[in-house]
Image: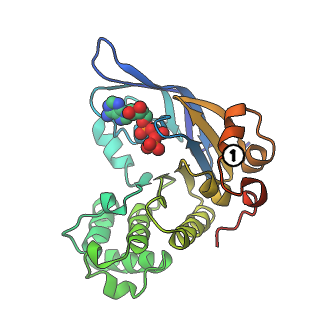
Amino acid sequence: MITPALTIRDLTIAIGNKKSPTRIVNGISLDLYAGRIQGLAGESGSGKTVSSLAVLGLLPANAIVTGSMRLGSTELIGLPLARLRDIRGRRIAMIFQDPSASLHPQIRIGGQLTDHVRRHLGYDRKKARAHAIELLERVQVPDATEALSRFPHQFSGGQRQRIAIAIALACDPDVLLADEPTTALDVTVQAGILQLLRDLALERQLAVLLVTHDLGVMSAVADDVAVMRAGLITESGTREQLFMTPQHEYTRELLASLPGAKTNSMNGDAE
Ligand SMILES: Nc1ncnc2c1ncn2[C@@H]1O[C@H](COP(=O)(O)OP(=O)(O)OP(=O)(O)O)[C@@H](O)[C@H]1O
């Protein structure tokens, strides 16, 4: 049996004051596998983002998290901050809807990529630079060498997201959390980024958690899909199961709201 790269069990999250915290996530379980994209779908406010932030221990201090999140044999819940920091970026990386959230506006791309690998992997300057160029080429940023000396604002939104992906992949993580990574981009740019994520998941045996409210995006790239509503996973299965034979009324409603769902949801090709 294949062991998941990340196992989430009975994750509950409550945020608020100690006496009456609000339950936001009510016991969700998910397995993420190397080389596969696990989609997490659901309406706004259902708890998708909060769940993925919990994996990295990035919730506010007043959040109470229970359950289990295991990265290989390491339990992440309750892990001391120093160890969690080491895991963040090195074994688990994250990209966001707004790539600027992952990029420092006043530091050249080269510096951002090389600082990261020098800090986490201990590369010297020359090796880090060569690695940065290789990464930028892989994510198809044009003129990779020249791009190193540019600032984030000198790139388009799509290129910025590619750079954020390069930074996320710099230390060859096991898990990539992608929260609405294409929502802010136009459709043609979106397709290219989704294709890249799909290729990278396979090529690097990355376990990807793709959080999106957009079932069109889900149908284009996810291998497995879980549907979340009000802090619970209401249905999960392979993409085929979810889109062809949805079991729950809520999943059927979501599918019905997808433009052209019946005709194009299974074409599996984002380009
Ligand atoms: N720091 C916080 N303090 C209190 N409540 C929060 C906090 N962060 C999120 N919430 C609440 O948790 C719930 C889930 O939010 P979350 O962002 O995870 O939803 P989502 O499914 O990702 O939706 P969206 O697609 O709109 O981002 C929402 O009701 C939100 O208001």
Residue 94 in sight in this render: yes
Q: Is mark 1 within 8 Å of ligand 1?
A: no
Q: Which residue is mark 1?
A: 255
- What number of labels is visible? 1
In the image, taking residue 148 as reference, residue 4 lies left or right, namely: right
| Colour mode of the rendering | rainbow
Give above or below for 141 relative to 88.
below
Residue type at mark 1: give it: Leu
Residue 79 in sight in this render: no
Q: Which is nearer the eye, 92 or 236?
A: 236
Query: Which residue is painted at 33% across and 59% down in the image?
Result: 102
In the image, taking residue 59 as reference, residue 246 lies left or right, namely: right
**Residue 133 percent coordinates (x, y):** 39, 80
Q: Quadrant of residue 196?
A: bottom right
Picture quarter with the C terminus: bottom right
**Residue 231 percent coordinates (x, y):** 52, 29
**Residue 127 percent coordinates (x, y):** 34, 77
Picture quarter with the N terminus: top right
> Badge 1 local density, few (<14 within 10 Å), some, or many (20+)?
many
**Residue 109 percent coordinates (x, y):** 29, 74
Q: Which residue is the extreme one toward the right?
A: 245
Q: Quadrant of residue 55?
A: top left
Give above or below for 89 relative to 17.
below
Which quadrant does ligand 1 occupy?
Answer: top left
Q: Which is nearer the eye, 188 or 226?
A: 188
Q: Quadrant of residue 195?
A: bottom right
Query: Which residue is painted at 39% across and 65% down in the image?
Result: 164
Q: Which residue is the extreme one toward the top?
A: 19
Q: Which is nearer the eye, 74 or 41?
A: 41
Give above or below for 156 relative to 89.
below
Mark 1 residue element: helix
